[in-house]
Amino acid sequence: MLGQGGSERDLAGFVLPEVGRLVETADPWMPYRLLDGHGLVVEPVEAFFAEQQAQAKPASTIRSYGMDLLRWWRFLTAWKVEWDRAERVDARDFVRWMQIADKPLRVHWRHRRAGLTAETAPAPQRKRPLPPGAPNPVTGKAAPGPKYSVRTRVHCETVLRTFYDFHREEGTGPVLNPFPLDRARRSGRANAARRPGQPFHAERQGRYRPSVPARAPRRIPDEMFNALFAALRYHRDRALVAFWVSNGARAEELLTSCGRDALPGEQVLGVVRKGSRAYQEVPSSTDAFVWLRLYQEESERSGVPQGADEVLWWTLRRPWRPLVYHAARAMFVRANDLLGANWTLHDLRHTAAYRMARDPQVSLTDVQWVLDHAHLSTTQIYLEAGADEVIATLRAHHARQSRAAQRPAVPAPGYRPESLRTLFGSTG
């Protein structure tokens, strides 16, 4: 493959170098910064982050964009290509590399401090090792494989195309976007042939954007959830999971609640939404508030800070610190390990949405409001039934059909039996 300047590019033996890094700052004006191999701030990415913050993107979204840009910056650095000199052949090689090559091995931060590399660091120990990409025997969900997932590649292509579109409009980047739109879809107005009442379709998609396969439903079956809940060790963890599975709040949203936000009398819990940063009270189950009260009584005896303005969720050991997403995720992973499962915190949100939607007295617009979705089509993704449930439902349907066929025909009300015998003859 010819790269920039006509040089031969060996993608088969290419290894992404670990140059540069994405760092988290304490500056609310710039929560994340991308540093190059010399430790200097990458100014084009800094401007792009400022644009995303102006569009009310949360810090977690900026971080996800930064990880994609860091991967692209490392690729360009390895081939000595300036970001504003990148051509479509460079983007094409990058996309091909992500599709075929293995992901770089990540070194644990403890080993990194000791100066170990991916070749010298010991392999992580797993209680129940699974082959990469193999489905989990408990959940049926595939374990992370050695390759980049399709959704990771889709996200990366979208971020890089948006990044170059931003600099092209500002006049600070290349005239031609290295990540162009599809040839068949970049001309004309998007959804020009859409009729009123029909949904909008993503017609303007990138040329190098892969097709995303249908994802299996992510809800946790009731018997599996009961086993997972029983594996939790502390009242705090039980309260968290009970709220997540009853109100459908995102994992990081629930951690924003303070003492004054829990209203057991009204059975609502106030959270700060991820996208809009708006405050919203979401209805929660009675069991969740029971576990919350048990956790609060236990916290009072331990000396955990209490009060209306104090955060609701704290660490379990001194020094007391507000619980963050990564610590909550680690708690959930430990419970999973006891069962050999690989459920995620986001699966609890899918489970809550599915349970609400299965109630015939709860409308889909109510579920949409609780989940804080802008479009009803997004809510429908959460409502897909699993294959086991569809099979059981259809089996019951066929059983009802068989029983109905075996029942004798009953005349409709208003017809006399002797008149039917005269008309159709005797059936006996």
Image (cartoon, rainbow, N blue to C red):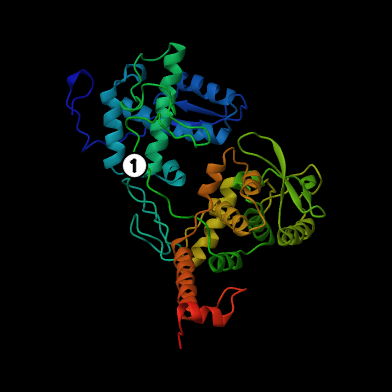
Is residue 9 left or right of 131 when viewed as pictured? left
In this orientation, which residue lies closer to the viewer: 186 or 46?
186
Rendered residue at 36%/21% (across/down): 187
Quadrant for residue 72, please give it. Answer: top left
Position in image of residue 353 (x %, y %):
59, 53
Rendered residue at 36%/53% (across/down): 123
In the displayed structure, would residue 320 be above or below residue 152?
Answer: below
Is residue 356 left or right of 219 when viewed as pictured? right
Q: Quadrant of the N terminus?
A: top left
Position in image of residue 313 (x %, y %):
69, 50
- Disc 1 packing (10 Å; few <14; some 14–19; many ≥20): some
- Residue at the bottom extreme, as displayed: 428
Is residue 260 left or right of 183 when viewed as pictured? right
- Residue at the top extreme, as displayed: 171
Position in image of residue 154 (x %, y %):
39, 37
Instruction: Give, as a three-letter code, the residue at label 1.
Output: Pro
Position in image of residue 22 (x %, y %):
47, 32
How many marks do you count on the picture?
Answer: 1
In this rendering, does residue 183 appear at all? yes
Quadrant for residue 99, please give it. Answer: top left
Rendered residue at 47%/75% (across/down): 399
In this orientation, which residue lies closer to the viewer: 18 or 219?
219
Is residue 129 left or right of 406 when viewed as pictured? left
Quadrant for residue 185, please give it. Answer: top left
In this rendering, does residue 408 appear at all? no
Q: Which residue is mark 1?
A: 104
State the SS at label 1: loop
